[in-house]
Image (cartoon, rainbow, N blue to C red):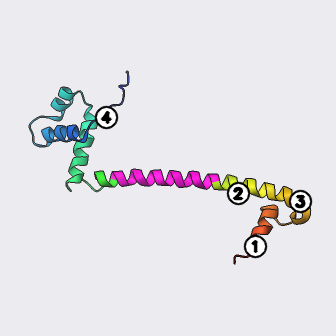
Amino acid sequence: MVRRKRRKFTPQFKADAVRLVTTGAKTIAAVTEEFDLTETGLRAWVKRAEADEGKGTKETLTTAERSELIDLRKRLKRAEMERDILKSYLGASSHLLDQKLGKRYSGCGPGGAAGCFLETATIP
């Protein structure tokens, strides 16, 4: 079975295809054949349209909820990347500080000299 290249459809196209099904003008099979769509894709559009109208099940996300979820996932991924960058930067800084201050702070435990510096630093 050869996979078809992923296609994008405009919101208007989706709404028109859903309208044909929900008004009873055509069956799902007829719409999928006429517009060369997959049955699962069209069923998902119908399900989402029903959720947007408040007719769907609890499990079906509305378009707004789906958009918010996508945005939250992007923000989480960005925060995780920033955390990893900070961790690597702090690790490098700790190593450089250990080299610069030498054995004077070697018994400071985790973080070495950087750990001692951070523990003893006072914030004005």
Q: Nearer the viewer, mark 4 or mark 3?
A: 3
Quarter location, residue 86: bottom right
Q: CA distance from mark 1 to mark 4?
A: 56 Å
41 lies above or below 34 = below
Q: Do tag 2 and tag 3 residues touch (Cβ < 8 Å)?
A: no
Q: Do tag 4 and tag 2 residues touch (Cβ < 8 Å)?
A: no
Q: Do tag 2 and tag 1 residues touch (Cβ < 8 Å)?
A: no
**What is the three-letter code of the residue carrying label 4?**
Lys
Q: CA distance from mark 4 to mark 2?
A: 43 Å
Q: Do tag 1 and tag 4 residues touch (Cβ < 8 Å)?
A: no
Q: Residue at x 17, y 27 (%)?
A: 34
Q: Residue at x 21, y 37 (%)?
A: 13
Residue under label 4: 8
Instruction: Pinpoint residue 100: horizontal percent, then vertical percent.
Output: 85, 58
Residue under label 1: 121
| Secondary structure predominantly adopted by residues drawn in magenta | helix
What residue span does the magenta drawing correspond to? 66-85
Q: Quadrant of the C terminus?
A: bottom right
Tell which of 23 and 119 is nearer to you.
Answer: 119
Q: Which mark is residue 90?
A: 2
Residue under label 3: 102
**What is the three-letter code of the residue carrying label 2?**
Leu
